[in-house]
Image: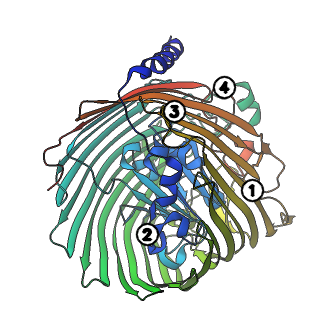
């Protein structure tokens, strides 16, 4: 019934759009080139930045199902977002999930300039709803020279456009597996002082058994321009998230019924009987102050406080975590302009402190039983940094920066084995970066960089699921060599970007599993990571076409040659084996068409090579191809209302694949099946209040 309804809506949209009013859409190829990148404090156009940065803007986010960031991020080279079950995310930037059995680690994430990554190194990216994101910058490779710990990179998320008129936004989407997503936003004020209030409610029964999800997120964001020198902004978020965790399947179980949840095995109950789930509540509040001392000297400072409460019944135990933390970041920027040269110096610091408590109990049917361990965790991380950017005559640019970092985790065990206090400290970690670029032609930039990255063990790695405290883990660190080219062709209708890197990582932290399936971590000696990332975008028709105002063909490709160079576990030598969890080749391609009457079409194809599932490379996930599309009708109703009616399909050919493999899983329980063919549709309304849109 639902399938027929969506097919009918597809036809209705295609025909009805011919009578819509004009609704111009931007030339996406040129928008991507001219977007201002904030990463590395550059504040320059993407095509002029001497770094490998992926930008995901609101147009790219809204070409899918208006539910998840995953498909838009996976359409960019060098990035792979995984979903083990609805609400359970991992973010892989150049192999960074090697140490992430679940959650987002080894990547520093900021939301509106506020550290979303806690001082323990974990990021609750799943706490954000789709509508809490307006744009994303992904800084690939070591970004420690400005953003501290993390060998994978950094992610800068912004929730609001630079300016928007007062009004009301209403969004609703529904689809397969009883999926519902409702969002409402109220925008008030003017260019000097404005407020945005938002609320999202999302539910789904999930594709697999025992994968129900509920997400509620409320936000308030405000900006206040006191005068020409001073501006204040604040971001407040409260999220209440619940999702069931079905557990991994063996190959036999996966091939027999990929929708099944983990069954009972030995002494362990099934995921359903254990009522395995995540109950997660998070509060985050941050205040940003910008002050311009002179035309050439300014400061941006952020302070924040956050609290997360997590309850996690599993088939092994029941965990309860309390995680309050706070911190801040400040950046001073000095600019000097000469006739044919310019200088920018950025310097500052960042600090975070957390006072966590983690308790594990026996799991009595989804309720806590006898206390097994009780741990107080005091963690902090501090960094100071400086960066100089010099733009020279002859179209040369030089960027050089470095940071010094210190972190510590102290665990006081109050109950259970290893009672007492244990500390792991990581001091004086230097992380320099230098980049050189040259504009060979007006539309061509060639760049090269060398950077050192480091990442100390996270709290969840020193205190893993085994509940055995491991303070012997060392920080991983390495040097990354990179070169790339960004170029425009054919009167800026074709944009091509290619970069290659070589990353030698020492003391790489990798995950292992014990006989019960609990994860623990060890240093793997060294790894060698070589790759090529490329993307191209071509505007098929001139922008002055009478009917089509945007027709874009695009493609991105990632080549990864990642391997262990020195990794032995007891008598087993894994040296020379591929790193598990990373495909050698991935390709994403798409077509985006929008017309002046309002009809639009987005088509996407994705391919992934086989993926090694264990360090021995004896088990692999099969390669797969995915296809999907969205069509819709955007129509302006008068001057104050914009409507977007849309429908779409994901995994159109009903491919069976796993989107979040459990690496090195005990008993070969690697597989977490992604949804088969599924459909969605929805409508969005934007009610603009013209009065008060400007001061």
Residue 605 pos. (x, y %): 66, 37
Comparing 315 with 176, the one in front is 176
Instruction: Look at mark 4 in the image and give the residue it sits on.
Output: 654
Comparing 84 with 114, the one in front is 114
Instruction: Look at mark 2 in the image and give the residue it sits on.
Output: 119
Residue 491 pos. (x, y %): 59, 55
Residue 546 visible in this rendered orientation of the protein: yes
Identified at 58% across, 72% down, the residue is 50
Residue 630's place in the image compared with 45, above or below, is: above
In the image, which is nearer the foreground, mark 3 or mark 1? 1
Residue 178 pos. (x, y %): 45, 23
* Mark 3 residue crowding within 10 angstroms, few (<14) / some (14–19) / many (20+): many
Residue 55 pos. (x, y %): 51, 57
Instruction: Look at mark 3 in the image and give the residue it sits on.
Output: 211
Instruction: Look at mark 1 in the image and give the residue it sits on.
Output: 559
Asked if disc 3 and disc 1 are in contact, CB closer than 8 Å, the reply is no
Tag 1's secondary structure?
strand
Identified at 15% across, 72% down, the residue is 227
What label sits on residue 350 in the rendered view? none
Tag 3's secondary structure?
loop
Mark 2 or mark 4: whose residue is earlier in sequence: 2
Mark 3 or mark 1: whose residue is earlier in sequence: 3
In the image, which is nearer the foreground, mark 2 or mark 1? 1
């Amino acid at each position: 019934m639902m399938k027929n309804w969506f097919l009918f809506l597809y036809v209705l949209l295609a025909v009805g759009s011919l009578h819509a009013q004009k609704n111009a859409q931007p030339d996406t190829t040129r928008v991507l080139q001219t977007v201002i990148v904030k990463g590395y404090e550059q504040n320059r156009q993407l095509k002029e930045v001497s770094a490998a940065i992926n930008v995901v803007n609101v147009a790219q986010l809204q070409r899918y199902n208006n539910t998840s960031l995953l498909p838009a991020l996976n359409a960019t080279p060098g990035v792979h977002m995984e979903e083990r079950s609805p609400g359970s995310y991992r973010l892989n930037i150049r192999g960074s999930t090697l140490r992430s059995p679940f959650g987002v680690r080894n990547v520093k994430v900021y939301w509106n300039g506020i550290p979303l990554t806690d001082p323990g190194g974990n990021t609750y990216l799943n706490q954000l709803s789709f509508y809490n994101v307006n744009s994303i910058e992904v800084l690939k490779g070591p970004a420690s020279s400005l953003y501290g710990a993390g060998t994978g990179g950094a992610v800068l998320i912004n929730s609001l456009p630079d300016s928007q008129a007062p009004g009301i936004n209403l969004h609703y989407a529904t689809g397969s597996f009883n999926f519902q997503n409702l969002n409402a936003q109220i925008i008030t004020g003017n260019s000097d002082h404005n407020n945005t209030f938002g609320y999202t409610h999302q539910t789904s029964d999930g594709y697999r058994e025992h994968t129900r999800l509920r997400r509620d997120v409320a936000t308030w964001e405000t900006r206040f321009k006191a005068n020409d020198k001073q501006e204040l902004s604040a971001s407040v978020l409260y999220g209440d998230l619940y999702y069931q965790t079905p557990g991994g399947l063996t190959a036999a179980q996966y091939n027999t019924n990929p929708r099944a949840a983990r069954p009972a095995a030995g002494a362990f109950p099934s995921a359903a009987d254990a009522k395995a789930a995540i109950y997660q509540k998070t509060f985050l509040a941050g205040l940003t102050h910008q002050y311009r001392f002179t035309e050439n000297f300014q400061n941006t400072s952020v302070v924040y406080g956050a609290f997360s409460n997590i309850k996690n019944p599993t088939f092994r135990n029941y965990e309860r975590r309390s995680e309050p933390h706070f911190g801040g970041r400040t950046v001073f920027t000095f600019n000097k302009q000469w006739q044919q040269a310019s200088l920018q110096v950025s310097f500052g610091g960042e600090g975070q402190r957390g006072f966590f408590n983690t308790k594990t109990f026996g799991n009595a049917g989804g309720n806590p039983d006898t206390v097994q361990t009780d741990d107080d965790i005091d963690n902090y991380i501090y960094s100071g940094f400086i960066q100089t950017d010099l733009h020279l005559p002859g179209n040369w640019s030089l960027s050089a920066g470095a940071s010094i970092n210190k972190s510590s985790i102290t665990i006081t065990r109050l109950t259970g084995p290893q009672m007492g206090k244990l500390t792991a400290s990581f001091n004086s970690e230097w992380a320099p970066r230098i980049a050189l670029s040259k504009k060979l032609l007006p539309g061509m930039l060639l760049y090269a960089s060398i950077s050192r990255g480091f990442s100390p063990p996270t709290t969840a790695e020193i205190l893993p699921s085994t509940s055995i405290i491991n303070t012997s883990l060392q920080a991983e660190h390495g040097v990354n060599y990179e070169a790339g080219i960004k170029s425009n062709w054919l009167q800026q209708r074709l944009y091509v970007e290619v970069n290659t890197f070589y990353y030698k990582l020492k003391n790489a932290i990798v995950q292992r599993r014990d006989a019960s399936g609990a994860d623990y971590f060890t240093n793997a000696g060294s790894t060698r990571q070589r790759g090529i990332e490329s993307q191209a975008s071509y505007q098929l028709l001139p922008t002055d076409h009478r009917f089509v105002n945007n027709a874009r063909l695009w493609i991105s490709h990632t080549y990864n040659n990642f391997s262990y160079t020195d990794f032995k576990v007891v008598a087993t030598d894994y040296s020379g084996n591929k790193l598990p969890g990373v495909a050698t080749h991935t390709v994403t391609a798409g077509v985006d068409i929008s017309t002046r009457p309002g009809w639009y079409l987005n088509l996407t194809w994705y391919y992934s090579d086989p993926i090694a599932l264990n360090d021995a490379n004896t088990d692999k996930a099969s390669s797969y191809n995915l296809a999907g599309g969205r069509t819709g009708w955007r129509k302006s109703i008068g001057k104050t209302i914009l409507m977007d009616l849309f429908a779409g399909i994901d995994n159109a050919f009903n491919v069976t694949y796993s989107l979040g493999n459990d690496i090195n899983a005990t008993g070969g329980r690697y597989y977490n099946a992604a949804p088969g063919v599924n459909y969605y549709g929805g409508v969005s309304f934007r009610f603009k209040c013209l009065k008060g849109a400007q001061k």
